[in-house]
Amino acid sequence: MTETKAVKSEQTRALIVQTALRLFREHGYEATTMRAIAKEAGVSVGNAYYYFGSKEELIQAYYDELQDEHVAACRAVLAAETDFAPRLLGVLKARVDTMVPYHQFAGKFFKFAAEPTSPLNPFSAESGPARDSAVEIYREVVDGSDLKIDKEFRKELPELLWLYSMGIVLYWVHDNSPGCRKTYLLVERTVPLVNRMVAMSRIPGFKSVTRELVDIIRDVRA
């Protein structure tokens, strides 16, 4: 009975999220109320608030689900490749693949996520679990590869790759090409460049630059 109740609870939660996303797409984020979401999902307003305390929490749930989809979509390439560049390319393409179905209303969400004080901001405390999960994927990209780089730079590289991926996401939000073709092109053209830059960190003349970069990252983070 407890297991059945848990399954039903998760189904209700998923229904509320999917209903909210559809209404946000059709009517806009600001115009959609929790009451409207509850009515459309066939649950009471109190029940909707039981699962999600605000519309922001609904969007955060969407981010979390999208991140889970991305993690699952990365498994094949991470299992098959050991070279750094193909691993990074596969993970970034998988990121775009999982986002494309939501492209038509991505801009509506982005304007709220871009607000520094918003809980939807990717750097906010509320976004922490999704952010940590995203960085962890890039840690897998690095740790499962045959890269031979400075150990301190290796520790910081996953977060740098996540920041790089956020730049890709920003471009994707504004990409109006069919099937987001230009975003895929951006990924394909920039990954070899990133690969060369990472490889250059092993060259004696660039090691001091790499160490300075690591110091900058740590100072900014502190």
Image (cartoon, grey):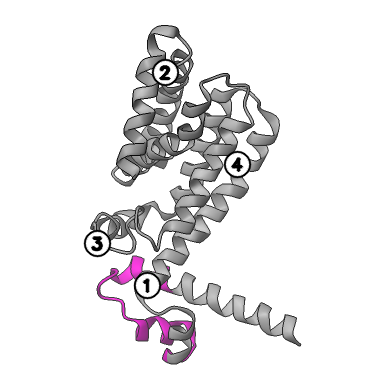
**Which numbered disc, 3 or 1, marks the residue closer to the eye?**
3
- Disc 4 element: helix
Whole-Å distance between the Cαs marked 2 and 1?
A: 44 Å
- For marks 3 and 1, the one nearer the N-term is 1
Give me the disc on residue 23.
Answer: 1
- Disc 2 element: helix
Image coords of residue 159 (percent x, y): 44, 39
- Disc 3 element: loop
- For marks 4 and 1, the one nearer the N-term is 1
- For marks 3 and 2, the one nearer the N-term is 3
Image coords of residue 164 (percent x, y): 38, 35
Question: Which of the two residues, 155 or 97, is positioned nearer the viewer here?
Answer: 155
Compared with residue 158, is residue 105 higher up or lower down, i.e. above or below? below
Q: Does the magenta portion include 42? A: yes
Location of mark 2 (residue): 197
> Mark 4 belongs to which amino acid?
Cys
Location of mark 4 (residue): 74
Whole-Å distance between the Cαs marked 4 and 1?
A: 30 Å
Whole-Å distance between the Cαs marked 3 and 4?
A: 31 Å
Question: Which of the two residues, 140 or 206, is positioned nearer the viewer here?
Answer: 206
Whole-Å distance between the Cαs marked 3 and 1?
A: 24 Å
Compared with residue 168, is residue 101 higher up or lower down, i.e. above or below? below
Please identify the quadrant where the C terminus is shown.
Answer: top left
> Mark 3 belongs to which amino acid?
Thr
Q: Tag 4: Cα neighbours inside 10 Å, few (<14), some, or many (≥20)?
A: many
